[in-house]
Image (cartoon, rainbow, N blue to C red):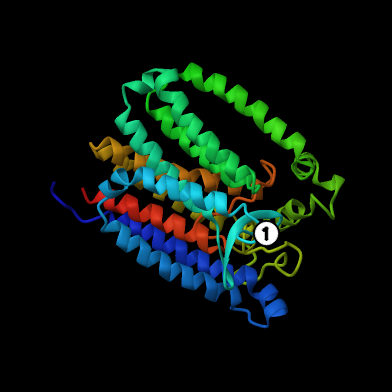
Amino acid sequence: MKKFRFDSFLLLAVLCISVFGIIMIYSASSIWAEYKFHDPFKFVKAQGVFFLAGMVLLFVLSRTDYHIYEKKANLILGICFLLLFLVLIPGIGTIRNGSRSWFGLGGFGIQPSEFAKIGLIIYVSKYLAHHRKEMRSIKKGVLPIFLVIGIFFLLIMLEPDFGTAMVIVLTLVCMIFVSGVKVSFFVKIGVVGLLGIVLLILVAPYRMARIVSFLNPWTDPLGSGFQIIQSLYAIGPGGLIGQGFLNSHQKHFYLPEPQTDFIFSIISEEFGFLGVLIVVSFFFYIFYRSLKISMATDDFFAKYLSFGLAFGIIIQATLNLCVVVGLIPVTGVTLPFFSYGGSSLLVSMASIGIILNISRK
């Protein structure tokens, strides 16, 4: 098989968006970091370490033959299952923000559900590539893979981490949809899924509180509605060109932990509609280049793999942006390449590295 240079335009876009993300983490977190840790660069330095590690991982994976993942798909899935099981055990997994979804490593935390995204995408890609004929049958082809997805969904929900679980399920459903499964099946599974989501909301009071605060955040402006209200207060004054870099008001102890899930609010406040347009354009460009690579390859495993990784990034970004502007309830989903968090950044970089390797062929 002839080898080519990887997609340099995709790499350049990822580098630009990642560096911009680190800059915005400093802007969003410096006040809080100075107050709590007496170091305004506390979060930037940590994110910088993960960025460098992510770049190394990206280049290593861009030069690693993607066929290895096809051969080791079952092993990768098994490791992901083991990690998701271990993190639920008290004393092994640590609790952050109410979820037992982390392994504590010194001052850092590793979130296995983030790595399970790639593991499941690899496994489903192999399954779809090897069972193209069986996918015409709901019983023989579709239900077995949905059973695997359901098991992992249950493990992640036990943490609980509803946002990550939804990103994974939506990504894998998109992959199965493009494999040629009948649309009528997705209509039926969609109805079942909606009923399941309603049940999950009803059995967890904090999720119901998020729904109520989504519909009317002013019913509890100092509780469940506080974050979205402060987010909208940040977005509103942004205007066309924003308040200027480092000039956000909401990061001054109004918007809780602005360097994480709601960093897009600070971008909007400081750079206005222009900044919003730039960020959204970068995500769509990354998605476009990834889909172009997916469509160009004749290898079905590579096609499904690059498609799934691209959709994983764009779905997560879309959910985050919808939360920040108040279109959907708070899910706890990070903004890829921007939000503070090592696991999210490493997984995003790894996804791009694999897509770049596919682009070589």
- x, y (%) of residue 31? 68, 75
Q: Quadrant of residue 265?
A: bottom right
Left or right: 36 with respect to 185? Answer: right
Q: At 62% from the left edge and 64% from the top edge, which residue is drawn?
A: 259
- Counting from the top left corner in percent of width and height, residue 290 is at 35, 46
In the image, what residue occupies the spot 35% across and 61% down? 58
Asked if residue 280 shows in the view, the reply is: no
Which residue is pictured at 66% across the width and 75% down the height? 33
- Say which element carries label 1: strand
Residue 267, how many percent across, how many down?
59, 61
Q: Nearer the viewer, residue 339 or 128?
A: 128
The residue identified by callout 1 is: 95
- Residue 38: x percent and y percent? 68, 83
Quarter occupied by residue 180: top left
Type of amino acid at the residue the image marks with label 1: Ile
In this rendering, would 245 be left or right of 171? Answer: right
77 and 66: which is toward the camera = 77
Give the class, few, some or many, for how many residues have Cα within 10 Å of label 1's Cα (few <14, many ≥20): some
